[in-house]
Image (cartoon, rainbow, N blue to C red):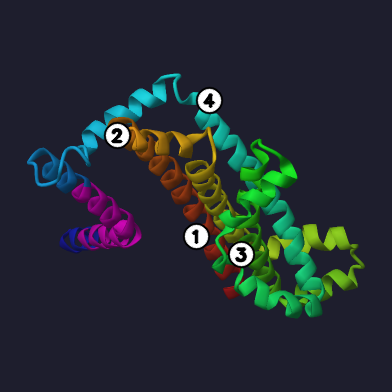
Amino acid sequence: MTSAIAVARTVGHDGKSLWWRRYRVPVLRSLLIVISIGVLELASRMGWIDRVSFIPPSEMAVSAWEILIGDTYRHDMMLTLSSAFVAIVLAVTCGFLFGLVLFRFPRLRRVLDPLLLSYYAVPIFVLYPMLIVIFGLNRWPLIMLGFLFAIVAMAVNTLNGLERIPLVLLRTARVLRMGRLQEIWLIKLPASLPFVFTGVKLSIVYAFIAVIGGEFLLSGAGFGYQIAFAYNNFDNKTMYGLMLLLLLFVGIINLVLYSVEQRLYQRRVLKEAA
């Protein structure tokens, strides 16, 4: 009886330790966020921070909820989301194909390597006037900004994934006399999926950065434009409400993508270990 109780206690203790090891990082991250919000709330309420320039997080949340359920900014939100979505689809598709081309032609890759390494050293927004000349005064210049900002990240991560495909898989494809499309769909894409998904994740982030940044600086409509408009008119409640909605939206997307990415990498490690 005593030994059974000891075993149960040991199992329970091991279970708690396993739970803590598994969820330690999310718990600590959430605790840090809650504490930071509490400190900002207290500092704003007590007057340690100027209320004119920074409102309490609770008021930001109220403003964000009012914006979310209202109709005033719905058109701008949908405009930004649709532009970012088109940019992401174009960047992921063309970036994946570009990565395949670089993998297939090593000489072309050696020629483009210096350009790819220095690509993000150039501010992408300097291309906006040229894009307006090409596409006109509409949403396409912003979409192309998001596309150009994201495509290289997708291509580079696709190339990294293809380079890490085990040679035995490629030889198997040749033995089975697979066509190009069959080899890509059945061999290369599944084997490089974790790295390709990292490229997708970065493409989503970069596309949103470019589209919203372009709206903030250059556009006359959209989510970024409304934040800039509220800032210029000293409408702090609206500005912080819009910013909070944007942070929550992008943060949730990043958490979901990060979770899926980690599972894909863990599955790849388990397969290689087996």
| Residue annotated with mark 3 | 195
Which x, y percent locates residue 5?
18, 58
Q: Residues within 10 Å of mark 2 (few under 14, many from 20)?
A: few
Q: Quote the CA–CA distance across marks 2 and 4.
A: 22 Å
Question: Which badge, 3 or 2, comes first in the chain's sequence?
Answer: 3
Task: Confirm whether residue 132 shows in the render.
Answer: yes
Which x, y percent locates residue 56?
20, 37
Point out the frontmost of discs 2 and 4: 2
Residue at the image point whose x is 27% and y is 62% from the top: 17
Question: Does the segment drawn in magenta span residue 197?
Answer: no
The amino acid type found where label 3 is placed reads: Phe
| Residue annotated with mark 2 | 234
Question: Which badge, 2 or 4, comes first in the chain's sequence?
Answer: 4
Q: Outermost residue toward the top?
A: 71
| Residue annotated with mark 4 | 75
Q: Quote the CA–CA distance across marks 3 and 2.
A: 44 Å
Disc sitting over residue 262 in the figure? 1
Q: Quote the CA–CA distance across marks 1 and 2.
A: 42 Å
Residue at the image point whose x is 39% and y is 41% from the top: 248
Question: Does the segment drawn in magenta span residue 17?
Answer: yes
| Type of secondary structure dominating the magenta stretch | helix
